[in-house]
Image (cartoon, rainbow, N blue to C red):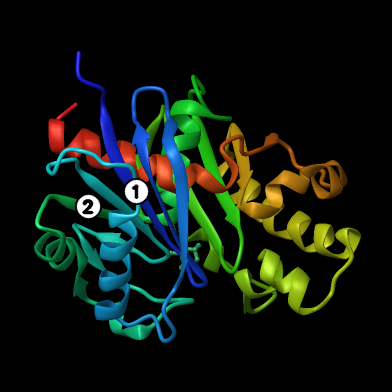
Amino acid sequence: MAKKIAIGIDIGGTGIKGALVDVKNGEMIGDRVRVETPEGGSTDDIIATVKALIKKLPAAPADTPIGICFPAVVQHGVTKSAANISKKWIGFDADKAFTKALNREVHLVNDADAAGLAEMRFGAGRAERGLVIMTTLGTGIGTALFFDQKLIPNAELGHIEIDGVDYESMAAFSAKEREDLSWQQWAERLQKYYSTLQRLFSPDMIIVGGGVSKQHEEFLPLLDIDCEIVPAEMRNNAGILGAARLAFRLANKD
Ligand code: BGC
């Protein structure tokens, strides 16, 4: 039987990463390719960069579906917000523009939703029932909500206001770096953030992802949250894997 494959692309503020993915077992085929995000992050420049990146991936049939995850609300293929990216993406029909430029079916999805889909299928949330909140700690805070494995798209819980501020600006990993916070100081902010999520949603599990999750031993033990809180397992490739899997599912009604 032919392999179930799709291309996954993860567009971020500093880098764009992509890989050919075996969507059945959630593994990358060949190496992951990373290029710098073009300065200014305009729609045209990013589309051109993604097109060039795809040419560097291992050869795949011309109709291989492409899934792209993006750091914004993505509703029915239209990018609707731009917290840490160029405002030109607001109201942009990205599915249509990428499909036209790449000449095949392309689906965009919010980056945290994609990472969550990968964790629920292949990682920390596999087989987990009930309410799971996926969070990614990076430049911003991405979140994805799942109930009985089903995604409720575009939860923007990174922007919950606590103490009168959009708390992403306090608790994202970028805040730790910008303010040179110790693990303990950062954990105090994470405690406030995650206990707010816990109080508002009563989740059964919280998954903590983003690049910094590989250092989870430095900060997760410092947190006291009234539900299971676990590190992501797919780490930095979760977005690529989740976007590829979603694109395959949509293309094949799988
Ligand atoms: C955006 C989200 C995104 C998250 C992580 C937030 O600022 O509003 O859409 O998922 O950053 O990139």
Question: In this picture, is 151 found above or below 103?
Answer: above
Residue 90 in view in this figure: no
Q: Quadrant of the N terminus?
A: top left
Q: Quadrant of the C terminus?
A: top left
Q: Secondary structure at mark 1?
A: loop
Residue 211 in view in this figure: yes
Q: Amino acid at mark 2?
A: His
**Residue under the image location 41 percent in, 79 percent down:** 38
Q: Residues within 10 Å of mark 2 (few under 14, many from 20)?
A: many
In the image shown, does 87 or 29 lie closer to the viewer?
29
Mark 1 — residue? 57
- Quadrant assignment, res 65: top left
In the image shown, does 186 or 64 lie closer to the viewer?
64
In the image shown, does 228 or 121 lie closer to the viewer?
121
The number of numbered badges drawn on the structure is 2
- Quadrant assignment, res 62: top left
Q: Position of residue 230 (x, y in %)?
A: 68, 36
**Residue under the image location 15 percent in, 68 percent down:** 97
Question: In this picture, is 223 found above or below 141?
Answer: above
**Furthest residue in direction top, as rendered:** 1
Mark 2 — residue? 107
**Residue under the image location 64 percent in, 75 percent down:** 169
- Horizontal side of residue 226 vs 253, given as left or right: right
Q: Amino acid at mark 1?
A: Leu
Q: Position of residue 138 (x, y in %)?
A: 61, 62
Is tag 2's residue or tag 1's residue first in the polypeptide sequence?
1
* Cα distance between the residues tagged 2 and 1: 18 Å
